[in-house]
Amino acid sequence: MEAGLYMLEKAILLLGILFVLTGVIQYGKRSQDWRGIATMFYKRIPMSISEFKWYRLGIGLCLFAVVMRFGLMIIFPVYTL
């Protein structure tokens, strides 16, 4: 069970990163503003609804994977000396 949850966590994280990249690439192709991608995390940019949904879903999945990682570390601690 522990190995399955570990693999699920990694899959969710990779899926989240893929969704974020999908939204970012869609924005770049539509607007031709590739410098806007660098400012996306601290400044507002005009994203379409589809781009925003991909981006926000990816961020949500990445955050869920991090919370899942902490949960797995609490439930299944690894003791090494």
Image (cartoon, helix red, strand yellow):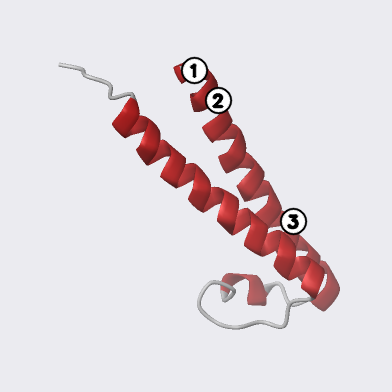
Instruction: Give the residue drawn at x 44%, y 45%.
Output: 66
State the image coordinates of residue 32 (x, y, percent, origin top left).
80, 75
Marks 2 & 1, CB-CB < 8 Å contact = yes
Query: How far apart are the alpha carbons under marks 3 and 1?
Result: 28 Å
Query: Pointer 2: what residue?
Result: 7
Query: Pointer 1: what residue?
Result: 3
Query: Pointer 3: what residue?
Result: 22
The image quadrant where one finds the C terminus is top left
From this view, report whether residue 47 is shown above or below residue 20: below
Query: How far apart are the alpha carbons under marks 3 and 2?
Result: 22 Å
In front: mark 3 or mark 1? 1
Find numbered disc 1 in the image and state the secondary structure of the residue it sits on: helix
Instruction: Give the residue drawn at x 54%, y 50%.
Output: 62
Instruction: Give the residue drawn at x 36%, y 40%.
Output: 70
Instruction: Give the residue drawn at x 21%, y 19%.
Output: 79
| Location of residue 68 by image quarter | top left
**Residue situated in front as seen by the camera: 36 or 2:** 2
